[in-house]
Image (cartoon, coloured by chain):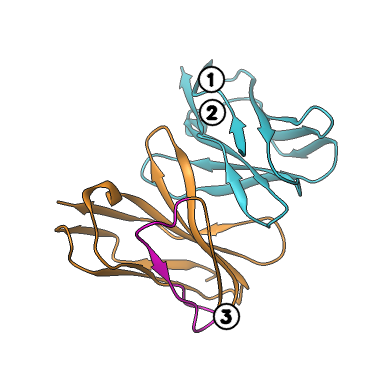
Amino acid sequence: EAQVTQNPRYLITVTGKKLTVTCSQNMNHEYMSWYRQDPGLGLRQIYYSMNVEVTDKGDVPEGYKVSRKEKRNFPLILESPSPNQTSLYFCASNDWGDTQYFGPGTRLTVL
Amino acid sequence: GQSLEQPSEVTAVEGAIVQINCTYQTSGFYGLSWYQQHDGGAPTFLSYNGLDGLEETGRFSSFLSRSDSYGYLLLQELQMKDSASYFCAVRNSNYQLIWGAGTKLIIKP
């Protein structure tokens, strides 16, 4: 089944404790993105990647890191999480068409 | 800056027709997409317009006017399961998808 998977689905952590949210897609897509979704603000892009070893900042990259060492994986890293990073996070992938496929989401709470 | 404007909430009656508008201002334009998101779920793709005009997919249609920087999503024969949030998104010249804040569609019996 074609899909984007994310882990964990839910995470509660404390300020300053490094964490990684994994994302993997099995559709051989070149393009992958990370978004955060906050009430009333829609989806805001954090980082995106057009290919292996190529990543670019989106609209809200501060406090986040990504890597793209393999085509299928695109982990999101929070080196020192803060409470303002409490949000719902989505990973997405697409080929060069216009349909983005989203993972199920990761609800992160930073205390 | 880049922005997409859409109404925050629309209410309609089951069986009726509803239109959700989207106006955009972006650096470059490579198409307008619409996504549906149910509470607690992930966004799912509904439709895409790259050129002016109407695209129809079953009960859903989407329209684009590039000269007006405007598009809309039309939902016909509304069903209770259509209650969700609907997002418009534009792909800009950097191949980024820029998103509207979403329209919550409330359907009453």
Q: Which region of the structure is painted magenta?
A: A60-74
Q: In which quadrant of the rendered view does residue B6 lie?
A: top right
A103 up-or-down from A43: above or below: below
Pointer 1 indicates a residue of which chain?
Answer: B
Q: Position of residue B48 (x, y in %)?
A: 72, 45
Q: Nearer the viewer, residue B63 or A86?
A: A86
On the image, numbered disc 3 is attached to which residue?
A: A52
B23 up-or-down from A10: above or below: above
Alpha carbon separation for disc pair 2 and 1:
5 Å
Decide if residue B32 is on the left or right side of residue A83.
Answer: right
Q: Nearer the viewer, residue A25 or B83?
A: A25
| Secondary structure of the residue carrying numbered label 1 | loop
On the image, numbered disc 2 is attached to which residue?
A: B79
B49 up-or-down from B71: above or below: below
The type of residue carrying mark 3 is Val
Q: Position of residue B19 (x, y in %)?
A: 65, 22
Q: Position of residue B71 (x, y in %)?
A: 72, 31
Chain for colour orange = A
Considering the whole magenta stretch, tell me its main secondary structure.
Answer: loop
Label 2 close to label 1 by CB (< 8 Å): yes
B22 up-or-down from A43: above or below: above
| Secondary structure of the residue carrying numbered label 3 | loop
Q: Position of residue A64 (x, y in %)?
A: 37, 62
Alpha carbon separation for disc pair 2 and 3:
42 Å
The type of residue carrying mark 1 is Glu
User: Image point 71% across, 65% down: which residue?
Assistant: A96
On the image, numbered disc 1 is attached to which residue?
A: B14
User: Image point 68% across, 57% down: which residue?
Assistant: B95
Chain for colour cyan = B
Q: Residue placed farthest to the bottom in the image?
A: A70
Pointer 2 indicates a residue of which chain?
Answer: B
